[in-house]
Amino acid sequence: MISYKALVTYASFLVVLFLTTTLTRHSLPGVLGFASNITFNDLFSATNKERVGHNLNALTVNETLNKAAEAKAAYMFKYNFWAHVAPDGTEPWYFFTEAGYDYRFAGENLARDFGNSDDVVQAWMDSPSHRENLLSPNYTDIGFAIVNGNLAGLESTLVVQLFGTPLQSHSVATTPTVAVKTERVVTENVTTPQLSLTPLHVLPTPQVVGNGEVLPAINIFNASRGITAVLGAFLTLLFTLDGFLAWRWRILRLSGNTVAHLAILILAVVGIWYTNVGVIV
Amino acid sequence: MRHYIYHYLPLLFILLIGGYFFVHFSYFPSYQFLVVLGIVTAYFIWGVVHHAVLKRLSIGVLAEYLLIGGLVVMMFASVLNIRL
């Protein structure tokens, strides 16, 4: 079971699994995806809990920022991208001004495919640049969009978190700020870019959710992780048994090093077990 | 194995450093996949050097390291949330 032929079979099985999920994404968009139970209220309270815990002001929900966040999420679904700056060069700040929010300070955090709200906020807190946004004293307002839709063939939940301080607010105007990649201090007029992208393919209209559970037909992450973890554990067991028997019966072999194989297989199984499905940018 | 215990120190170092960076890049699966590719490449090189020093390097041994490394890469390719 650990002959070359068997190893090729295991590898082929994984290649087939990978190709099947990739082809399914494109031929049957929306069937595969990631289960999510993210809510607006949970995100908002978790964000403010972190801020208050760091002796910062609690943020106020701003409806205009909510609309800007929804517009950003819809734009990402429409043009099938996942980034702060769109492939056509549209920056996050465009959505602030387009929604009618004239900002003095502005920032954006993005997340996708997380299972729940606490994990989203924890991921942002674990990343220095996102944490800097989340704990910036410059902001007074916050807006969210939690939108479910089809991104690159997978049913996904995008979370857009926008921070802002309106231009007319002078209370924090003298506070120095550290510009991170997703935070902007207004110093110039933001020009409206021309939108010229064409969607890669027609996708269903994304749905703003944020108050309930999203369940795709097949949770691709749990399915893939289960299969590969079992295969990895099976191989680890085989090599352990092989190494033990070779040692016990004092068999001299001119093959690879069982200890090295076991070490990388154990690392792989542990790594797969602790892999996160959620992504931030 | 006892005679070549020092051979395993570089392998241990490779796996520990790789594991550290894998955890460090949680929530950034593209970087995590690059880390996995780095670990597997280093593991393969370690295997070649280890067996060359012991004068036991053969095509079969190379194939074994390639197959197991390929399996590990495919396992992570199936699981990591990489797209677009």
Image (cartoon, coloured by chain):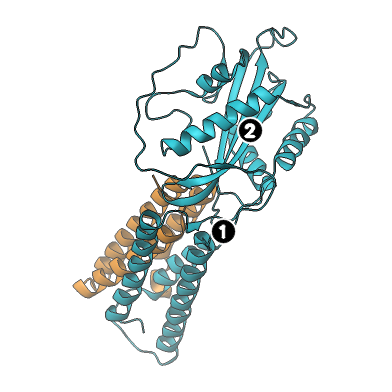
Chain colours: A cyan, B orange
Q: In this picture, is A172 found above or below A144?
A: above
Disc 2: host chain:
A
Residue at x 59%, y 56% (from the top left corner): A35
The percent coordinates of residue A245 (x first, y second) are 43, 89
Three-letter code, disc 1: Tyr
How many marks overall? Answer: 2
CB within 8 Å, label 2 to label 1? no
- For mark 1, give the secondary structure: loop
Circle 2 residue: A131
Front-most of residues A142 and A253: A142
Quarter assignment of residue A22: bottom left
Residue at x 41%, y 17% (from the top left corner): A193
Which numbered marker is on residue A233?
Answer: none
The percent coordinates of residue A210 (x first, y second) are 66, 43
For the residues labelled 2 and 1, the Cα–Cα distance comes to 22 Å
The percent coordinates of residue A212 (x first, y second) are 68, 50
Residue at x 58%, y 32% (from the top left corner): A70
Tell me the quadrant of the picture where the N terminus of chain B can be found. bottom left
Taking A270 as reference, is B46 left or right?
Answer: left
Which numbered marker is on residue A274?
Answer: 1
The crowd level at tag 2 (other Cα within 10 Å; few <14, some 14-19, many 20+) is some
Disc 1: host chain:
A
Three-letter code, disc 2: Arg
Taking A142 as reference, is A111 left or right?
Answer: left
Front-most of residues A271 and A252: A271
Quarter assignment of residue B10: bottom left
The percent coordinates of residue A196 (x first, y second) are 35, 25
Front-most of residues A268 and B60: A268
Taking A253 as reference, is A193 left or right?
Answer: right
Quarter assignment of residue B64: bottom left
State which tag comes first along the sequence, 2 or 1. Answer: 2
Residue at x 28%, y 69% (from the top left corner): B51
